[in-house]
Image (tube, grey):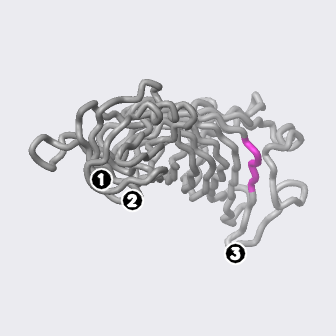
Amino acid sequence: MKILMLLVLAIPAFSQKVLKVRGDTILISNDDIELEEGKKYYIETESGEALIGTYTNASTGSGYVAKILDGEVAEGDRIAKYTKKKIGGGSVSRSHSGPYKKFQWGFHGGLNQFGTKTVDGNGKTLEESDAELGFQGGLVLQYNINEKFGINTKLSYNTFKASKEDKTTIPGQVITDYLSLSTITLQPTATFRVVKFLDVFAGVRVGMAMSLVQTTEDANGNELPIYNGKTEFDALDEQNQKLGKFEVSKIGLDIPLGIGLNFDLGNISLRPNFTYYLPLGALVESTDPNDVYETTYSNMAFNLDVLF
């Protein structure tokens, strides 16, 4: 046993993993699970189900030392589930869909709906666009403070689309304006687990506009010139902003409010989630004192996070 304890010093602690096996004695990482000394637990690993007895927590802080009472466990096995054995029976007094990991990383992807609304200086609505589906995806980092609270950060590339009918540009003809916006965003949120599979979260999202392009089509789907014979109008172009007398917010800020499900499947966590974004500023503002207006936006998204 002393030799086993000394070996702990040279072994890195991996999340919910069997670090060492010697005979019927095993060493388990204590980073992500809480085992009581002297209690018995059923654990599910890649080798199957086993019953273990925990009799000491390693003094180095690197893991729990336990004895295999029934079943098989192999070195390097990840623990997908553990349950506490009641005295006199096989039922459990505490159950987890999977022991939480302190650090997780992965990917996310999903769809969003984006719409715009333009009002004048008196708050009167001038026009509204119809929301269309866009795409977003990127990287996710998750730090779990405990089984209830965590910090989630997403780095995303986003495309947003909207459209509106224009009955005034060409008298007697209905044309459609299409808006396409792309951004890169950083979104840190605080996550709270309400019940076993249900999370709620809130935070802040900071975004940088990469492109904001408008195209126009007639009723037959033919693209029409918008500006100086061009069929695309780049609203981020400074020259276009000066001639159009408006300014685009290249840095955007909003508040994500969301709810999601959490499914821990051993080494992988699946987290479908819905987010509503509360904007904290306008997307476009007029710079013409004789024509005051601003365009705000609405945004909601559905994502699937895949964490390891």
Q: Of all residues shown, which one is farthest toward the left?
A: 88
Residue 104 location, x and y as percent? 53, 42
Secondary element under disc 3, as helix, strand or loop, is loop
**Secondary structure under the numbered disc 2 in the rendered image:** loop
The CA span between labels 3 and 1 is: 68 Å
Observer-side mark, 3 or 1, equals 1
- The span shown in magenta is 209-214
Tell whether label 3 touches label 2 (CB within 8 Å).
no
Coordinates of residue 18 in the picture (x, y in percent): 44, 45
User: Which residue corresponds to mark 2?
Assistant: 47
Residue 32 found in image quarter: top left
Please say whether residue 272 is visible from this viewpoint: no
Question: Amino acid type of disc 2?
Answer: Ser
Q: Are marks 3 and 1 in contact (CB under 8 Å)?
A: no
* Residue at 63%, 59% in the rendered image: 165
- Based on the picture, tell me whether residue 299 belongs to the magenta stretch: no
What's the residue at 34%, 44% (across, down)?
198
Q: Is residue 211 magenta?
A: yes
In contact (CB < 8 Å): disc 2 and disc 1: yes
**Residue that mark 3 sits on:** 220
Q: Residue furthest top?
A: 59
- Answer with the quarter of the image where residue 11 lies: top right
Q: Nearer the viewer, residue 73 or 145?
A: 73
Position of 44 with respect to 140 (left or right) is: left
Q: Which residue is mark 1?
A: 50
Task: Tell me the quadrant of the picture where the N terminus can be found.
Answer: top left
Give the Cα separation between the discs numbered 2 and 1: 9 Å
